[in-house]
């Protein structure tokens, strides 16, 4: 039988389906990759923000991870919301055992402004998780927090991407430009070359889950065996289409969507 690409996400949940584990699994499915998940935190959240959160114990997160990895091959994996220092410590021990490309989405703050990780875990994420990553995918505020610089231009994004690889030890960095104005330009640095991945900016407020969906798409393409640049380039096309097909659902920022809607949609 042909190899079935299998991808794993280690992240928190979104019951409205726009971000977190749910967005990741939808993306894996859409890209014809077998999707698996380890849940770190269960959130009560929607398009307007986060209402509540329950964190799983590190022991239980470890048990979930063992259940997956002892049974089914993982061809690529990603981490999203890892709320605490304890969870990060567990993952620094477990991740090297998974011999597959690792996409680190350094989730810190939701679009709604809600903090998703303990502020005291940020330095640990940078110093201990980042060096394990094949690629890290910060948005502008996350890249500023990780590098300590201010980012307002693509030149600043390039500088941050290079620092994340050369100073902090990530295998590659994709600094996402969704929070700037003008064209939606993301900067990829693979340790040798800088690339600008650009797309037209889509006029919509329905951007809930864009970062999760992009990093899940990179993970899916890596699980399929694509080289890093190809995976990032195709994932950029995927997220652009998902924003184009985003849905005006909920009272806040609606979710990205993976198929062209027949009814509604912000750009239908
Ligand atoms: N309005 C938009 N039009 C087109 N692409 C966008 C738009 N907003 C974000 N993107 C793209 O979506 C992806 C996620 O970016 P960003 O919003 O910066 O991350 P996050 O969701 O983690 O805050 C990036 O590829 C970014 O360029
Ligand atoms: C459980 C969970 N993880 C991550 C996020 C943040 O999602 P992201 O795609 O980075 O961006 P927004 O949804 O905030 O636009 C989340 N909300 N929940």
Image (cartoon, rainbow, N blue to C red):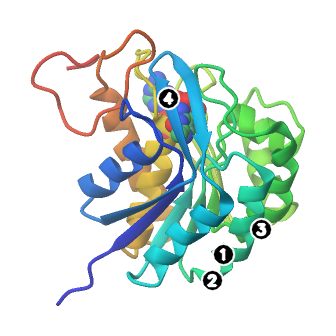
Which residue is labeled 3 in the image? 131
Secondary structure type for disc 1: helix
* Residue 192 at least partly seen: no
Query: For the residue with label 3, is its CB less than 8 Å from the closest atom of ligand 1?
Result: no
First in sequence, mark 1 or 3: give its number: 1
Q: Are marks 2 and 1 in contact (CB under 8 Å)?
A: yes
Tell me the number on the disc at residue 97.
2
Q: Give the CA separation, mark 4 to mark 3.
A: 31 Å
Q: Give the CA separation, mark 2 to mark 1.
A: 6 Å
* Residue 145 at least partly seen: yes
- Hey, which residue is sitting farthest bottom in the picture? 1
Which residue is labeled 1 in the image? 94
Given this view, does label 3 or label 2 mark the residue nearer the observer? 2
Neighbour class for label 1 at 10 Å: few (<14), some, many (≥20)? few
Q: Give the CA separation, mark 1 to mark 3.
A: 14 Å
- Which residue is rendered at x = 53% and y = 60% of the image? 78
Q: Nearer the viewer, residue 149 or 197?
A: 149
Q: Give the CA separation, mark 3 to mark 2.
A: 15 Å
Q: Is residue 149 left or right of residue 46?
A: right
């Amino acid at each position: 039988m042909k190899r079935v690409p299998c991808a794993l996400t280690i992240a928190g949940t979104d019951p409205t389906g726009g971000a977190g584990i749910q967005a990741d699994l939808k993306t894996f499915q859409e890209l014809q990759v077998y999707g698996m998940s380890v849940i770190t935190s269960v959130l009560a959240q929607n398009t307007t923000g986060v209402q509540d959160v329950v964190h799983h114990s590190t022991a239980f997160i470890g048990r979930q991870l063992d259940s997956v990895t002892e049974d089914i091959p993982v061809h690529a994996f990603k981490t999203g919301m890892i709320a605490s220092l304890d969870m990060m410590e567990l993952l620094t021990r477990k991740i090297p055992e998974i011999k597959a490309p690792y996409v680190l989405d350094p989730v810190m703050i939701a679009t709604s402004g809600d903090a998703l990780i303990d502020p005291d875990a940020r330095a640990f994420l940078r110093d201990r998780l980042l060096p394990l990553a094949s690629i890290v995918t910060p948005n502008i505020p996350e890249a500023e927090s990780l590098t300590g610089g201010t980012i307002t231009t693509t030149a600043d994004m390039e500088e941050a991407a290079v620092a994340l690889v050369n100073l902090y030890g990530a295998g590659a960095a994709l600094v996402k430009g969704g929070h700037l104005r003008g064209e939606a330009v993301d900067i990829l640095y693979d340790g040798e070359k800088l690339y600008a991945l650009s797309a037209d900016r889509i006029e919509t407020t329905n951007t809930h889950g864009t970062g999760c969906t992009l990093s899940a798409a990179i993970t899916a393409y890596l699980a399929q065996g694509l080289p890093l640049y190809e995976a990032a380039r195709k994932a950029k096309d995927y997220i652009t289409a998902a924003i184009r097909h985003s849905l005006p659902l909920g009272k806040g920022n609606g979710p990205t969507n993976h198929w062209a809607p027949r009814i509604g949609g912000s750009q239908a």
